[in-house]
Amino acid sequence: MRIVVAALVLAASVARADPELGTSTKAGHAWWNDRVLAVTPIIGHSRGGPYVAGWAAGADGKPIDHARFYELVGHPELAHTVVVRRTLGVAAILAGTALGIVGARDLAHHRDGGIAWYGAGLAIGFTGIYVTVSADSTSADQAKQFADDTVVIGARGRF
């Protein structure tokens, strides 16, 4: 008899009811209200007041890159565009720096064309900085809409 009672107590302590279909294990929250993807606007300030300067993406509470965000919301073409623009921007920065060094060397040795090489290096370098910084043309509102329209099932822990 003691063995039967012990087995029943053990079974009752281990067994628990599964949550009702469509509910989360978190009390009071449904599974569809648990946002896996989040978009947070970055607020800047100027003389005219605050403005949205950009946005940050997060998945399951962890920050992620914009390219990864686009892959998760089903826009691989935007992810590709971000990666290509960053790569081209960094390449332009390196090329502009190299041309600027050549131009500065030519200027120091009083050679013809030094100022042209130096100016071209500056222009290419600053263009590369612009392309790298503005690699993503999606606004915070558009990114928020992408996140709201996307249902990520079973994505927890894959970021």
Image: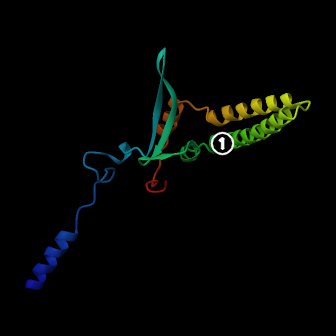
Most foreground residue, 140 or 44: 44
Residue 147 percent coordinates (x, y): 49, 39
Which residue type does callout 1 highlight?
A: Glu
**Which quadrant would the N terminus be assigned to in this image?**
bottom left
Q: Which residue occupies 76% across, 29% down? A: 123
Q: Is residue 29 left or right of residue 117?
A: left
Q: Is residue 137 left or right of residue 63?
A: right
Residue identified by numbered label 1 = 77
Q: Which residue occupies 74% across, 42% down? A: 94
- Coloring scheme used: rainbow
Most foreground residue, 102 or 110: 110
Q: Is residue 111 left or right of residue 47?
A: right
In the image as oriented, which residue stretches furthest toward the front? 109
Question: On the image, which quarter does residue 157 sit in?
Answer: bottom left
Picture layout, residue 84 above or below residue 113: below
Picture layout, residue 139 above or below residue 84: above
Q: Is residue 148 left or right of residue 30?
A: right
Question: On the image, which quarter does residue 85 sit in?
Answer: top right
Picture layout, residue 12 above or below residue 120: below
Most foreground residue, 31 or 106: 106
Q: Which residue occupies 28% across, 50% down? A: 26
Q: Which residue occupies 47% across, 32% down? A: 41
Residue 69 percent coordinates (x, y): 54, 44
**Label 1: few (<14), some (14–19) or many (≥20) C-alpha neighbours in 10 Å:** few
